[in-house]
Amino acid sequence: MAQFKFQLAFCWLLGAVSLSTIRVSATPIGGAARSEAVIPGSSIAVKINKLATPSLATRSLVDGLKTVEDLVRKAREDSQLSKRNVEYSVLPLITTVSQDRVAQLVERATVLNPNYVPTDFSAWYQVLFAGSKSEHDHELSDILAKLSGYHEVTSCHLLSGASLPAVDPSNDPLFPGQGYMTPAGEGINAPYAWGFPGGDGANTTIIDIERGWKLDHEDLVDANITLLAGLNVKDRYQSNYRHGTAVLGEMLMVDNNIGGVGIIPGAQGHVIGVTRVVGGGPFENYPEAILDAINALSFGDAMLLEIQVPDANGNMFPVEIIDAVYDAIHLATSLGIAVIEPAGNGQQDLDAPILRIGSAVPASILNPSSPEFRDSGAIMVGAATSSIPRGRVLGSNYGGRIDVHSWGENILTTSVTGSGDDIDTYLPFDGTSGAAPIIAGAALSIQGMVSLNRGTKLDAFALRNLIKIGGTATSNPSVDKIGVQPNLRALIDGGHLFYIQQHSSMSAEIITPVGFIVQTFSSLTCHIDRLFFIQATHISNTRVKMKPQAILAALAGSYELLNITRTRANDSVEIPTGQSPYAFTGLLIYTSTGYMSAHMTSFNISDLPDNGANLVWPPRNTTDLDDAWAVVAKTTLAYAGALSVDPSVPSTRESGAILHGPLRVTNTPAWVGGTQRRHYRVVKQKGQDGGTFLRLSAPVNSDATIHGTLWWRKLD
């Protein structure tokens, strides 16, 4: 890959300083490989504005590299710098994941999250400088300030300089000291969740992103945690090992007869280092580390970002104030990957404007009430005291953007000691860096229970909303402003996670998961969208039975289409009040004798052919309108055939599953003879805009994590 090396008349001052000598090797794969100490070089990220001039929009990679080189040279000439020469290189920001793969991930994110605005990662570049942090930080700020003023530059910022912000625990001797797991009021009540399938994090994966870890710690070695990318940096002056080892212990300490136990010992853990070898030396690259994690994870998995970064005044903030990091996080969450992010230990109000390094004016990017606010989708974590009454710890950032909190002090976990950080031990941990792994554990406990009981997982936004339900507030929430501490028992007992299943400590029989339906067992009702866990000493395993003819008679009628939306499996049900972005009109007919027909077509002007007024039926014997007819066919769906009640799913007049098919007539040839299941729910609402509404839903992707939902209003 082409590299541009130039002489700059200043010293770049970004990398974290170590007093040890540099030892750099190729990126290690596996848990044992590590570097004893690394002094990262200085680096910045620059995003060019491809639309600033027509030529930029069509530039090749080499031309883009040259553009950044020219901009950096110009910034150097416009600034007041010393006369020392320093070599630097320009590379794409993301080098470990191919551009084609990144494009695929971005495209998939637009499908999974209709609100996701695609990021052009090819517009991001990194500038790597020979040299580490020194006394001339103001020179770097001057260069970034100059770059940010050029119309060709959309964003620029530092790339380094961050700070590290069925289980049986009875035989784990230190478990009694892990108070952050105890019942609500103090902890998140992890032991209660362990009594449910998946509550230990089974069938989930998490990646911790930071600088270093002692992966062969006595209470972590059997967890088989692997290093997937980057360097594992052992640097006792930066406390990398102490920090990373403590983080992993909170989540993944093995359930054995030594030490403590993690919140999610059943989860699979991996780590990715922010330090990597590229451009001739070790540099830190947070966005690339996040892209590495995205490339390794799947829908419903999670990553933990144990990084905080300074603003222009040196105060510590969440890492997403860096634009390239925000872009990477938003891609992850839009792909259904949960991101847990510490709020930072700067004692700052996140609702206030933030003056970022390289920016000329402050911006309220973390204030949900501000027009400048941007939501990455990450679960942002504050820190609270461990004792009751609980309040925000002195160092934690705070504000409306913070979703949840947990302990920020006295967190007993794995650690290292000794002059070389090579002796295994267990020590208290603190700060938002300590609170975030507790939240990550709670999140994957939830995800594990949902996965094993429902056969699917929550997307990042749904998980973020769910983890707050029933949580425990601090003693003064309006002042503390760090959200609630998750309460796993409240989520379980409140029926927010399961189909009807049995807790291991109960004698109730297990009821088969049934999907999007309502079931009634005597006076106990399971609501379709909350998926209640019914607590009782005994529940009959008898399914609700109703004659199919009675169900078809109740559903029979003509319906007009109100809207079409993509919904995730846990979305709440509301009567739609307006048209969705899918601008379709349609008519659905069900008969009590077992037949159906459906027709939907777009009324969006942009979907209509330019010469549509000339289309008549039957079509004229001419080819000049073939393109127009093709547009009509592309935006129209029609089919008809048999209608029946799905015998495999308990159904009532109000909810259940029906089968469209075998289909006899359709404008989609591949559907002929096929049968399609639709989960349904009937909702009746009073008032001027009320009536009888029919909700139909079905999976629209291969892993059934997203459902297409159609709302119909009954006409007769």
Image (cartoon, rainbow, N blue to C red):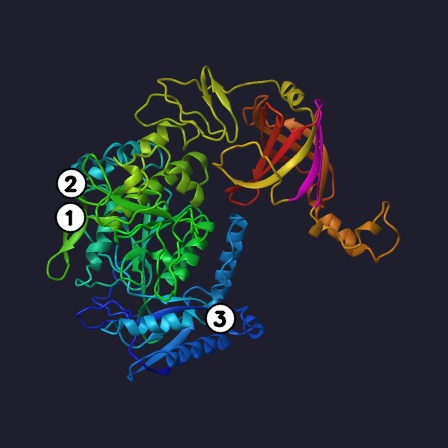
Residue at image x 76%, y 53%? Answer: 609
Can residue 551 be seen by looking at this rendering?
yes
Secondary structure state at the residue bearing disc 2: loop
* Residue topped by disc 1: 426
In the depicted structure, whether residue 220 falls above or below residue 5: above
Residues rendered magenta in the picture: 583-603
* Residue topped by disc 3: 151
Q: Which of marks 2 and 3 is in front?
A: 3
Asked if the residue under mark 2 is in contact with the one under mark 1, i.e. CB atoms within 8 Å, the reply is yes
- The residue under label 1 is which amino acid type? Tyr
- Structural distance between the alpha carbons of marks 1 and 2: 9 Å
Quadrant housing residue 574: top right
Q: Where is residue 467 in the image (x, y as percent from the top left)?
A: 37, 38
Can residue 485 be seen by looking at this rendering?
no
Residue at image x 14%, y 50%? Answer: 425
Nearest the viewer among 653 and 159 is 159
Q: Position of residue 604 (x, y in %)?
A: 69, 47
Quadrant housing residue 173: top left
